[in-house]
């Protein structure tokens, strides 16, 4: 029962991430993706730091910035490149390959056994996402494809390493550290590649509040909390709920068409996510990855 609760709570994070496209296109100014990513990550991270009053230990600074880069700075930057150069369906389908990448990386970094059922569920999920999102306008731009694959690999590596390196603090502190580090890494990129952001309207501020407070602070707390309790392969399968939510929101709020083929794709995705939870359930012969205890004194709290 507890595992089911962990799965449902963790699944809520990618389900909410599915609202990102709707909020970004309808509530935020176009043409400032990296700057908006900074405003999504950094304020949320600083707010959580203020709430937790817990800074990463010195020994964790390198890990924090690496995870912040993989889960946020590199991932979001490549995601935007893929979104600009590819149709949304192609970019999302490439992103769904993350589940397969996690299976391979977890084998190498965590020693997790590769299960045939988990691989089959991940492949079925990719097929379902393709049915859900790919259309006749799908095009193959080499740079866009490289960015899409790189973004998926970055998030996959961040997922596995977030499980491997269990933090000495709470999941909320872990979220604060990574959001802040990722936001800081994105600041120079935004200043270098984008013009200054124009004055924000109340609608823009409401969109940023949603993406920062709910789409970053709250959801990534759920995500990192889930990664400490679920197998990486199981958690990565939950990420496929994001395109399902995006399509449903587009149908409800934007009046976008929902074809029978897309409905079949959605059913396949949901089914593959469910099968992925079963296939990735650790057996008695598979040792669980446990947090590495560190002395409480290692925590650094600001004055």
Image (spheres, grey):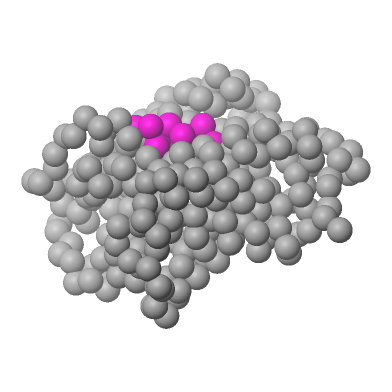
Query: x%, y% of residue 287?
Result: 68, 26
Query: x%, y% of residue 301?
Result: 83, 53
Front residue of 264/150: it is 150
Q: Is residue 59 above or below residue 247?
A: above
Q: Is residue 61 above or below residue 212?
A: above
Taking the spot 53% from the left edge, 39% from the top edge, the residue there is 69
- The residue most toward the bottom is 202
Q: Is residue 221 above or below residue 121?
A: below
Front residue of 243/191: it is 191
Report the magenta stretch's main SS.
helix
Q: Is residue 76 visible?
A: no
Front residue of 184/92: it is 184
Query: x%, y% of residue 25?
Result: 29, 64
The reply, left or right, for residue 216 in relation to residue 132 is right
Q: Which quadrant of the figure has residue 58? A: top right
Q: Which span is picked out in magenta?
A: 149-158
Q: Which quadrant of the figure has residue 36? A: bottom left
Q: Quadrant of the N terminus?
A: bottom right
Q: Is residue 140 visible?
A: yes
Query: x%, y% of residue 124?
Result: 31, 37
Taking the spot 14% from the left edge, 59% from the top edge, the residue there is 259
Taking the spot 33% from the left edge, 35% from the top edge, the residue there is 147
Q: Is residue 41 above or below residue 116?
A: below
Question: Does 157 lie within the magenta span?
Answer: yes
User: How many numbered tags mark residues here?
Assistant: 0
The reply, left or right, for residue 81 in relation to residue 49 is left
Q: Quadrant of the C terminus?
A: bottom right
Taking the spot 30% from the left edge, 30% from the top edge, the residue there is 146
């Amino acid at each position: 029962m507890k595992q089911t609760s962990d799965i449902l709570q963790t699944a809520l994070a990618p389900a909410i991430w599915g609202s990102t496209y709707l909020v970004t296109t309808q509530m935020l100014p176009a043409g400032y993706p990296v700057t908006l990513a900074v405003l999504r990550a950094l304020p949320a991270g600083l707010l959580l730091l203020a709430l937790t009053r817990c800074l990463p230990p010195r020994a964790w600074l390198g890990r924090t910035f690496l995870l912040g880069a993989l889960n946020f700075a590199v991932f979001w930057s490549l995601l935007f490149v893929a979104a600009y150069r590819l149709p949304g369906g192609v970019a999302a389908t490439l992103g769904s390959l993350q589940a397969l990448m996690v299976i391979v990386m977890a084998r190498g970094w965590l020693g997790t056994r590769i299960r045939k059922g988990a691989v089959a569920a991940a492949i079925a999920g990719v097929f379902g996402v393709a049915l859900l999102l790919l259309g006749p306008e799908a095009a193959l731009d080499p740079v866009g494809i490289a960015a899409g694959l790189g973004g998926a690999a970055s998030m996959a590596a961040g997922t596995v390493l977030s499980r491997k390196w269990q933090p000495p603090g709470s999941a909320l502190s872990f979220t604060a550290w990574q959001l802040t580090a990722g936001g800081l890494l994105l600041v120079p990129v935004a200043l270098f590649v984008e013009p200054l952001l124009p004055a924000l309207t109340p609608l823009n501020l409401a969109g940023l509040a949603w993406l920062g407070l709910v789409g970053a602070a709250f959801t990534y707390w759920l995500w990192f909390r889930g990664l400490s309790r679920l197998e990486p392969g199981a958690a990565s399968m939950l990420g496929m709920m994001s395109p399902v939510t995006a399509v449903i929101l587009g149908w409800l709020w934007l009046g976008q068409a929902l074809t029978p083929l897309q409905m079949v794709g959605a059913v396949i995705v949901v089914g593959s996510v469910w099968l992925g939870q079963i296939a990735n359930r650790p057996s008695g012969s598979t040792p669980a990855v446990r947090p590495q205890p560190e002395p409480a004194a290692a925590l650094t709290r600001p004055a």
